[in-house]
Amino acid sequence: MSEKEPGIGHNSGKDNAAKPFPKQGEQDARLRSFIERIERLEGEKSELAEDIKEVYGEAKAIGYDPKIMRKIVRMRKMDVEKRQEEEALIVVYKGAVGLD
Amino acid sequence: MSEKEPGIGHNSGKDNAAKPFPKQGEQDARLRSFIERIERLEGEKSELAEDIKEVYGEAKAIGYDPKIMRKIVRMRKMDVEKRQEEEALIVVYKGAVGLD
Amino acid sequence: MSEKEPGIGHNSGKDNAAKPFPKQGEQDARLRSFIERIERLEGEKSELAEDIKEVYGEAKAIGYDPKIMRKIVRMRKMDVEKRQEEEALIVVYKGAVGLD
Amino acid sequence: MSEKEPGIGHNSGKDNAAKPFPKQGEQDARLRSFIERIERLEGEKSELAEDIKEVYGEAKAIGYDPKIMRKIVRMRKMDVEKRQEEEALIVVYKGAVGLD
DNA sequence: GCTACTCGGAAGGCGC
DNA sequence: GCGCCTTCCGAGTAGC
């Protein structure tokens, strides 16, 4: 916290009590709200990660090899990424040529 | 390759070649289904990751430092984990002492 | 430095002076040698990075768009990675089936 | 797209359509050559990265902690950069004072 | 100044 | 159960 925005982050200290508008409480609430939204989303993300693990577990229980499955998933993902990359290239070509 | 399930991965072996045409299609469908479920979940997970990035972005636009926010989130997460561990430990203790 | 190899890292302290063979100097030289090898390699790596930048610069000077070029390079790289992944998948299939 | 070089990317524009077919093949070869030079250099860069990893691996096998070694390397690098800056500063000073 | 990419570090899953 | 390896996350760097 040095060269960043002046008086940022959290409006260090209580000096704002001196200012006309008592906004510190609102600021805190805002930050708090952001944090909580993030934590909520992180929680959902973790649940999904667990769900995924469970699916691999089910598949394994039936005799499929998770390792192979992971490789397949990766390959398919690479496919779509490659495709997206190609499309992105076209976009950038068009931009370079003035066809926005 | 020893303790692994025999006849794994993908219906390995020749038995299915021996039987009329028993279930290969169904097996494929099953694997395919697993893969798709996983991909679906992975997709949702990625969306959440993006959502989280957006929240950090919003906060940043208002003047909060994402880097610090991340630290806060990590710390709070560690706190709850620590607390959960402690509570779990208490449960163990109680069990050990007969206070179920 | 806690659960790691006992008395490691750098043979903490001077107690080795007590041991029959005064090897500390050799140990230091060894570590020093590793560090210098690494620094040498890092140096070469940085030079290559600069060379790459220069090539993009040349191309740009002639009218090629570095951004596009980078995308092309990335795509081609993804191609080879995809291919490698496919081959790796085959290997893992073979392993699962016992064809080591 | 405004500040970009006009006539970019790949011989943009219509002139090449106008001329019989003068140089398109050569242009392609040129771009291709750039790309290949870059890929060559990137390849060497990757090899060096692997070499570096190997050195850390060797050191680790003997009991040195790679993590600490990395810290040392970083610190030494900062030292030389700092020293270079200082020397550069001295040169500037000398120039300013007429001690070329 | 911001964004995107690359690199290093940490954690989790897998195999032995 | 431990160690290895892959994968995910965060940090630093470079380009626009």
Image (cartoon, coloured by chain):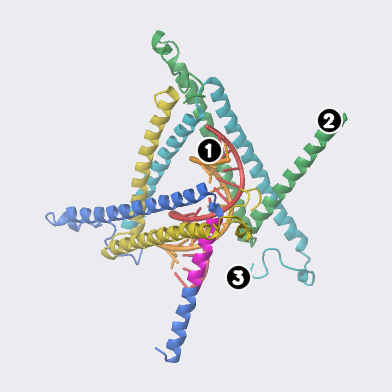
Chain colours: A yellow, B blue, C cyan, D green, E orange, F red
State the residue in front, B53 or B30: B53
* Same chain? Circles 3 and 1: no
Left or right: where F16 falls relative to B31: right
Disc 2 residue type (three-letter):
Gly
Query: Where residue D65 sits: x, y (%)?
Result: 63, 60
Task: Judge whether C89 appears above or below D84 on screen.
Answer: below
Magenta segment's dominant SS is helix
Residue C75 lies in quadrant:
top left
Q: Which residues are magenta?
A: B68-82
Query: Where residue D78 sits: x, y (%)?
Result: 71, 48
Q: Residues within 10 Å of mark 2 (few under 14, many from 20)?
A: few
Give residue D43's mark. 1
Query: Where residue A78 sits: x, y (%)?
Result: 38, 44
Residue shown at the point (60%, 32%) measured from the top left: C51
Q: Residues within 10 Å of mark 3 (few under 14, many from 20)?
A: few
Q: Chain of mark 2?
A: D
Left or right: where D28 falls relative to C47: left
* Residue, far left: B20
Disc 3 residue type (three-letter):
Glu
Give residue D95's mark. 2
State the residue in front, A69 or D3: D3
Q: Label 3, label 1: how many angstroms apart (C-alpha)?
A: 38 Å
Residue A73 shows up from this direction: yes
Dot 3 corresponds to which residue?
A: C3
